[in-house]
Amino acid sequence: MLQLQSMRDLVRNLGLYPIPQELQSMRNLLKAWVILFCFVVIFLINAYIRFKLSIFVKFSIISPTFHRSSLMFFNKAFWNAILYLINKKKIKIIISGINLNNMNSTSAVSTTDMKDIKLQDFKNSVVISNHRSLFDFILIYYLKTMMETTTHQEINLSFFNWNEIWSTPNLSLLWAILNNDENWEYNKVQLEKTLRNMVNESDPAKTSNWIVHFPEVNIFDEKTHSAQTHQADKFYLPKLNELLYPRFNNFSNLIAILQKSNSGFYGFKNLIDLTILYYNPLKNMFVQPKLFEILSLKQPILIINIDLKFKPLNKLPFKQRKLEKWLELDWCEKDKVIEVMQKNMRIDE
C-alpha cells in the first residue's frame, strides 16, 4: 500500500513543495525544474539500462562479470554528474578526525587537518550517520571519492535504507520509499545473501565495500523531532535535542550477520560513525537544506561539518539488547557532539 506520508516527505525533502524561500525567484525556480527534468531523464535511462542488462545476463547474452562492470560504470557516471554540479558551488566542507593530504587543491571543498589514521580503517566498513538532508547521500559519496584518492583503492558504496540496498537511485528504490514507513525491516535471510554476494563479487586486492545506514530512517526536521520528543517522554527514552531516536532492527540485523560470519566478518572490519551538520553563516542558522536548493542556486552559502569516528566491529556487543543499548548511547553522544559543533561554528552576534 502506498504511504502518502512517505510521498509527501520525499517531495518536501527534494525541495519541490513547499518551495524553499531561496528558490522563489523565477530564475532559480526554472533552474530547479530543469535539474529535476534532467534527473528524471537520467533516472529512466538508468532503469532501462538496468532492465536490459538483467535480461541479457539472464539469457546468457552477456557474462555476469560484464553485467557487474557495466552497472558500476553507470553508477559512477550518475554520481560523477552530480559531483560535477556540486564542484561548481563554493560549498565549504570541514571534516574532523582525518587528514586528507592528497586532496585536489583546485577543489571547492576545504578540510580541517586532524590526526592521521590508518588507511586500513577505511576498508570494508559499515557507515552510520545522522540524517539531515537528501544531500547526505551525495556528501557521503563525495567523502568516498576523497578516501579513494587517499587510499588508492576503489570503494564500492551501497546504501541500506527504505527496505533496499542500492548504489544509485532506481525505480525499485522509489517503489520501496512509497510503500514503506519508518518501521521497515529488511528480510534477514535476504540481507545475509546480499552481503555475501557483495563481498564475493569484489576483488579484495583492488576494492573495498562500504554499506551506509541511517538509523534514524527519517530526515531530521522540527515536526518529526517534536513528535518523537513526545514519545520519548511517554516511554522514558533519552531526550535528544538534535537527532531523531534511532531504529534498532535493521542496524542490529546488519551487525549480527557480520559478527557471526566465519569468513572474517565478510571482510567488514570497521564501523565509520559520521555526524553531519549544515550551517548557513549569512543567516547564522543550522539548516536542513533541500536537495534542489543546493543544486540549483548559483551560490549556496553553506558550511558543512562532518565529524568522523572509527570503531572496530568486533568491539561492538554481540547480544541484540546490548547492541541496541550501544546504539542508543552512541546517539546520545552524537547529540552532544552536534551541540559542540554548533557552538564552534556559530558566528557570535
Image (tube, helix red, strand yellow):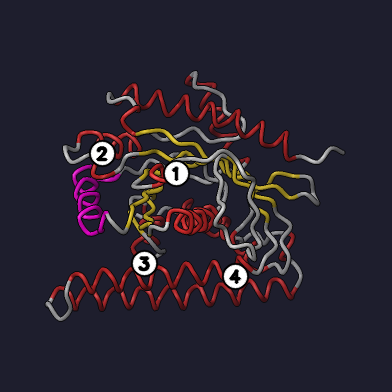
Which residue is at the front of the view, 347 or 144?
Answer: 144
Of callouts 1 and 2, the N-terminal one? 1
Q: Callout 4: helix, strand or loop?
A: helix
| Residue that extends furthest to the bottom in the rendered view of this protein | 61
Of callouts 1 and 3, the N-terminal one? 3
Q: Contact (CB < 8 A) between labels 1 and 3?
A: no
The reply to whether residue 171 is visible in this rendering is: yes
Give the residues in magenta.
186-204
Of circles 3 and 4, the one toward us is 4
Measured in 3D between alpha carbons, the distance from the residue under mark 4 to the one under mark 1, in whole angstroms, is 25 Å
Which residue is at the front of the view, 169 or 109?
Answer: 109
Task: Locate the C terminus by quadrant.
Answer: top right
- In the picture of the structure, the residue carrying the numbered disc 1 is 214
Taking 62 as reference, is 23 above or below it?
A: above
- In the picture of the structure, the residue carrying the numbered disc 4 is 85
Q: Label 1 amino acid?
A: Phe
Task: Locate the N terminus by quadrant.
Answer: bottom left
- In the picture of the structure, the residue carrying the numbered disc 3 is 171
Q: Which picture quadrant has residue 258?
A: top left
Tell me residue 227's x, y (percent): 56, 34
Of circles 1 and 2, the one toward us is 2
Q: Label 2 amino acid?
A: Leu
User: At 72% across and 36% down in the image, what residue appears?
Assistant: 344
Of callouts 4 and 1, the N-terminal one? 4
Label of residue 258 in the image: 2
User: At 51% across and 54% down in the image, what residue appears?
Assistant: 143
The reply to whether residue 181 is visible in this rendering is: no
Q: Callout 1: helix, strand or loop?
A: loop
Residues packed near mark 2 inside 10 Å, few (<14), some (14 to 19) or many (20 plus): many
Measured in 3D between alpha carbons, the distance from the residue under mark 1 to the one under mark 2, in whole angstroms, is 17 Å
